[in-house]
Image (cartoon, rainbow, N blue to C red):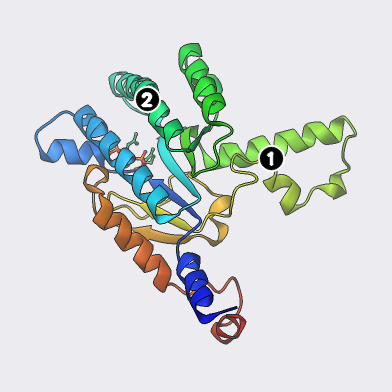
């Protein structure tokens, strides 16, 4: 391979293939401005749009965004209701644009708790964009990492009960195949905005070897510059996957 090709490969290899974001800090962003928390959620939609555009531009293959956790139902009913309305509004307005840009849209999480109208809109959006070959945008809604693993275990248990598989055929790979992000590249980079250092029941299974990036920046302020900082830092990390540093250097 020519030096130029090698260089190109090295440059593309530095971009994380799969980025996930815990989009936190909308409420505090609004409160700091003397506004209602829901104003922060509305402002956060702009950051979602920016992040999708930047991720696609940089060549990220999968962007997974945490929009609503299985624990977020515990918030005041009025806030939950605004979040649901916002989700529907964004679906109506933005999915066509995603489709135009070749983005494949999917929603992960336990969708059975959503209104039938919202469920229908989600299925329609996924169907519209199903054949697209650009970046995959996965939005996690009523998602919980523990739910994802439990759900995969349940599917496998049903297969065993129906004698389609034997218990000894259950492996990390077959369990992975039943999780929400099966078939997509491994999670490389997990970003959390809003200043907290926790995973809040997001991608527990998938984060096994992800690099973590925490920033104090509140989600509505997360822009191209901040996203680029996260990607640059990812590039500087040495991913050893259990090996020694010397082994990693020799393999490259
Ligand atoms: C994240 O922002 C959005 C959702 C969880 C839906 P928050 O609403 O959690 O904002 P803070 O953390 O209270 O500032
Ligand atoms: C995590 O944020 C969920 C989303 C960003 C959707 P939270 O604000 O719900 O997390 P906790 O409660 O502070 O852990
Ligand atoms: Mg929060």
Q: Can residue 118 be seen in this view?
A: yes
Which residue occupies 42% across, 28% down? Answer: 95
Image side of residue 247 versus residue 173, left or right: left
Q: Which mark is residue 87?
A: 2
Which residue occupies 19% across, 29% down? Answer: 39
Please tell me whether residue 40 is drawn above or below residue 177 in the rendered image. Answer: above
Q: Where is residue 41 in the image (x, y as percent from the top left)?
A: 26, 32
Residue closer to the observer: 115 or 3: 3
Which residue occupies 48% across, 38% down? Answer: 102
Q: Where is residue 249 in the image (x, y as percent from the top left)?
A: 55, 84
Quadrant hosting residue 246: bottom right
Q: In which quarter of the image is the N terminus?
A: bottom right
* Residue matched to label 1: 178
Q: Where is residue 189 in the image (x, y as percent from the top left)?
A: 45, 58
SS for callout 2: helix
Which badge, 1 or 2, is on the more N-terminal residue? Answer: 2
In the image, farthest residue toward the left: 34
């Amino acid at each position: 391979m020519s030096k130029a090709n090698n260089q190109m490969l090295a440059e593309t290899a530095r971009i994380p293939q799969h980025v996930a974001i815990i989009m936190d800090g909308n409420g505090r962003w609004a409160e700091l401005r003397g506004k209602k928390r829901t104003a922060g959620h509305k402002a956060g939609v702009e950051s979602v749009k920016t992040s999708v555009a930047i991720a696609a531009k940089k060549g990220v293959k999968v962007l997974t965004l945490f929009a609503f956790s299985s624990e977020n139902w515990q918030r005041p009913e009025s806030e939950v209701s605004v979040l649901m309305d916002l989700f529907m509004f964004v679906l109506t307005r933005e999915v066509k644009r995603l489709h135009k840009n070749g983005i494949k849209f999917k929603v992960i999480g336990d969708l059975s708790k959503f209104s039938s109208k919202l469920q229908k809109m989600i299925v329609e959006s996924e169907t519209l964009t199903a054949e697209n070959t650009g970046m995959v945008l996965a939005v996690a809604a009523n998602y919980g990492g523990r739910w994802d693993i439990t759900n995969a275990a349940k599917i496998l248990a049903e297969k065993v009960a129906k004698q389609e598989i034997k218990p000894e055929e259950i492996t990390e790979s077959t369990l992975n195949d039943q999780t929400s992000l099966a078939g997509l590249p491994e999670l490389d980079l997990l970003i959390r905005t809003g200043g907290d250092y926790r995973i809040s029941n997001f991608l527990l299974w998938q984060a096994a070897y992800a690099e973590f990036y925490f920033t104090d920046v509140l989600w509505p302020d997360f822009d191209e510059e901040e996203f680029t900082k996260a990607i640059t830092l990812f590039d500087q990390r040495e991913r050893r996957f259990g090996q020694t540093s010397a082994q990693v250097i020799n393999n490259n």
